Amino acid sequence: MSVRVSHAERLLISTIMTTNASLLTADHFAVILGFEPENSVSATPALFPFGLQFPQGHEIERHGRLKMFVSSFANDVPEPQQDRVYSQFCARYLPATVNKFLDLPPATDQLGPDEADLLQEYEASNAYLEILIQVQHLPYLYKYLRSSKEVAEPGKRLTLVLAARIAARVDCWDTMLQRWEQRDMERAGFYNSAAGCAIQLLNTLCSYQIRTDDRTSIIPSATQERMLPVLTRWAVRYNGQFLGDVCQRMLSWFSGSRAFSRGANKIRKIAKGWEVCKLPECNKKEDLKACMRCQTVRYCCTDHQKRDWSGSTGSKHKQLCFQTEY
C-alpha cells in the first residue's frame, strides 16, 4: 500500500528526481508542507510535474508526494548537502512543522477502497512527522527542544503527543503486520515502516531528555503500559531488523536500563554539540565558546572557529550555520 501516489506518478517522480533532487532547497520542502517560503522557489513542470501545492485537506496526497521527494533526496544527493538543506529548513521552519504535527489539519482526501486505511494512520503517519524523522539527527532539533523562548514552547508537548499517537496505533499496526506479511509485502512494509520510524523518533526525543529523573513526566505510565506488550513482541519477532532494534531501545528506556542511559547521554552530547571543540582535529573540552549565530557548536579559540568555517580541514561550518528564532 503506497501513500496516495499512483504507480505512474511514482515512476515519473523517481525518473525526474534522480537527476534533479540536488535542486531541492529548504524552501521547496516548506512549500510542499504548505508553508509560505522565505524565498521564491522554482516549481517548473520539468522538475515538479505534479506541482508542489495541494488542495486544502489533501494531506494523504501531500504525505505521499513528500515521501517520494525525501526518498530521492536521500538516495541521489550527497549527505553533506542533505544536512545543509535540512539544517536550513530547521532554522526557518521547524517551529511551524512541530505546530502542524501537534495540531494536524483535517485530512479529507477522497480515497479508493485500497487506500481507506491511510486516513486511520494519518495522526501517526503524516508529512509533518516525516520531516521530523528526517531532521532528528541535527542539532537544531535539540536546540529547539531545550529553548526557553515562546516560539519553542509547543515543543515541550512533542514527545507526549507522539507517544500517545503511537500507543493508539500499535495494536492496529500489529494486526495489520500479521495480516499482510504473508499476503502483500508492500502493504506490510508500509505498516512496518510507519511503526519503526515513529518509534525511532520517539526514542530520539527520549534520549534528548535522558536527564529527566521522572520518566513518567515524559511518557505517562498508562501510555507506556499500552505500548509495552506490542513492543515486547516486536523486539522478538523482528530481532535484528530495524523495527525490532528501535523497539528494543524503547523497552530499555521504559526499564531505566543503564546501558540505554549511557548511549542516550552520548546521543544528547552529540546533538548538543557543546562537549568538544568543533574543529575535527581538536579534542579540547574546556573553555569553549558557542558560535554566536547558530549556537549549535562550540570552539576553544577564534582560530579554530575560522578554520572550521572556511573548511580548511575538510569541515565547513558555514554550510550548516543558520540563525534561528528559537
Image (cartoon, rainbow, N blue to C red):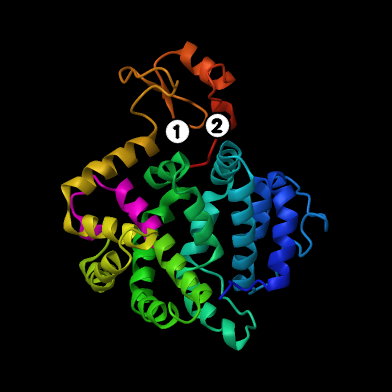
The circle on residue 296 is 1
Q: Position of residue 147 (x, y in %)?
A: 40, 43
Dot 2 and dot 1 residues touching (CB under 8 Å)? yes
Q: Dot 2: what SS?
A: loop
Inspect this view and state whether residue 276 appears: yes
Q: Reading the chain from its start, which is encountered first: label 2 or label 1? A: 1
Q: Residue at x 31, y 48 (%)?
A: 207
Q: Position of residue 253 (x, y in %)?
A: 23, 55
Q: Position of residue 249 (x, y in %)?
A: 28, 55
Please check the rendered image and state whether residue 292 is part of the magenta-colored stretch, yes or no. Answer: no
Q: Residue at x 56, y 70 (%)?
A: 105
- Describe residue 150's horizontal placement relative to residue 6 as left or right: left
Q: Quadrant of residue 44?
A: bottom right
Q: Main secondary structure of the magenta part?
A: helix
Q: Residue furthest right?
A: 45
User: Where is mark 2, residue-wise?
Assistant: 321
Please check the rendered image and state whether residue 202 is part of the magenta-colored stretch, yes or no. Answer: yes
Query: Looking at numbered disc 1 in the image, what kind of residue is underneath it?
Result: Thr
Q: Dot 1: what SS?
A: loop
Q: Position of residue 120 (x, y in %)?
A: 48, 80
Segment tinted magenta in the rendering? 199-218
Q: Residue at x 44, y 39 (%)?
A: 139
